[in-house]
Image (tube, rainbow, N blue to C red):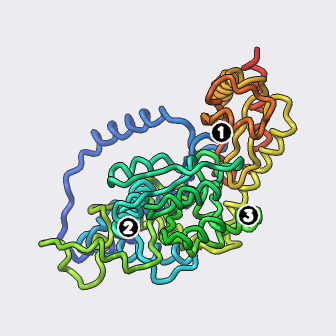
Amino acid sequence: MIHAAELDLLRTALVQLAGGFESLPAHDPDFDVVRAKAVLEEAARRLQDNYPYHHPLYAGQMLKPPHPLARLAYALSLWINPNNHALDGGRASSALEKECIAAIAGMYGWSGALGHLTGGGTVANLEALWIASCLHPGKRILASSQAHYTHARLCGVLGLPFSTVRVDPSGRMDPVHLRELLAEGNVGTIVASIGTTGLGAVDPLQDILPLAGEFGVRVHADAAYGGYFGLTRTLTTKTRSAYELLSRADSIVVDPHKHGLQPYGCGCILFRDAGVGRFYKHDSPYTYFSSAELHLGEISLECSRPGAAAVALWATQQLLPLVPGGEFAEGLEHSLHAAQALYARLVESAHFQPLLSPELDIVIYLPDAPDAERASVLARAVFGQAAKQHLHLSLIQLPSEFVRLHLPSLQANAPLTTCLRSVLMKPEHDAWIEPIMSILESAAKAARA
């Protein structure tokens, strides 16, 4: 879990950091080492009450351990504790954040884009929808029924009407229904999910963008989960087409704290047209006077933000550049391969039935059963039995009629079917498919006993 070299690297870096402040008069705050040691050890004991998120046998929610360098850089910056709201509070870390934003925007072919880091995808999407409301006041937001639930909630916060677009059998936004809703009028923005967090489906930008142009609406790409997969080389042709068109979206959200190997919380919002910065413009009587350069608080809704997040992301991107074929992209390839390998093994299994061939690294499956009620009971039982063997999964409830599109023999005797869901975000998952499958088979037998 903890590499011994990490602590040595941090100690060396802290000495380097302290060297930059040697000219100041000596000042050592009081620090009761004995009491602090006891409290810290108790905190360590309390933190043991967690699932093993770092381990390959954790294949449940979207939890991926930060890269060791990200941990170290984040910790290093805490001795400064920079605030990236204004240059007064985070001069160096603000510069690093701007470099990070340029690199992420470059991943989508954008130069000169406006963007910044946020506390996570929720705030990033809030800013995207807020700009949408500034450009199209009072107009409706459209997102698929598999889009993240926060879009509907955020529209409620912003006082915007919201409508759901149905999905096709693959879980992608249905262009036919989208056209029908656009034809009704009063639509300002379409939210395209580039990797839904439930199914891992990528909405078809190749169909959405022409419709947006025809009806004069914006397209916001919520790529919080799937935003980095465009760097890979093994996507299907249809999925690849969506990623190749991301540069034509008006705004993009991506979460470095998902596949970007960062600690929580680290989201990112990007706008293709830097001119939307005018909507952020505000005055502060005491904040923005230390420099004529751009203060990040001038282009964000959040005020205080941890500069540590920018330092950690910058360090990671220096070590693992965001380039196709690079080491970072190779890690994503392993996750994609792991999902396909697990899917293939589930197809062969006598105990499970997978629903969809995974587009990204999420696999949805359910125990073999005649009807929705029995399948749901068995799914929950497998979930519990697998956990006893240290394999941690997640559950997802899907409309039974959607499940029947893939498993027509399943009787829909309940409106929802509880399915098993595995997120194979860690590159290490690629080497752990056999142990994972072995535990799944054992858990399925125990669930039926």
Where is mark 3, residue-wise? 238
Query: Where is residue 179, by image quadrant?
Result: bottom right
Q: Are marks 1 and 3 in contact (CB under 8 Å)?
A: no
State the separation of the CA atoms marked 2 and 3: 31 Å
Where is mark 2, residue-wise? 136
Task: Please tell me which residue is depicted at 74% across the width and 24% down the height of the picture.
Answer: 371
Residue 121 in the image: above or below residue 209: above
- Local SS, label 1: strand
Query: Where is residue 274, by image quadrant?
Result: bottom left
Residue 358 in the image: above or below residue 217: above
What is the x, y in percent for residue 164? 52, 49
Please identify the residue farthest to the top as the structure is shown: 449
Task: Please tell me which residue is depicted at 66% across the width and 49% down the height of the picture.
Answer: 171
State the separation of the CA atoms marked 1 and 3: 23 Å
> Is residue 449 at all visible to an observer of this figure?
yes
Which amino acid, by three-letter code, is at mark 3? Answer: Lys
| 220 lies left or right of 275 | right
Question: How many neighbours does mark 1 have within 10 angstroms: few (below 14), some (14-19), or many (20 or more)?
Answer: many
Question: How many neighbours does mark 3 have within 10 angstroms: few (below 14), some (14-19), or many (20 or more)?
Answer: some
What is the x, y in percent for residue 82? 30, 65
Question: How many neighbours does mark 2 have within 10 angstroms: few (below 14), some (14-19), or many (20 or more)?
Answer: some
Residue 297 in the image: above or below residue 28: below
State the separation of the CA atoms marked 2 and 1: 38 Å
Where is mark 1, residue-wise? 421
| 439 lies left or right of 422 | right
In primary-sequence order, the first of circles 1 and 3 is: 3
What is the x, y in percent for residue 41? 39, 37
| 247 lies left or right of 346 | left
Q: Nearer the viewer, mark 1 or mark 3?
A: 3
Image quadrant in which the C terminus is located? top right
In primary-sequence order, the first of circles 2 and 1 is: 2
61 or 207: nearer the viewer: 207
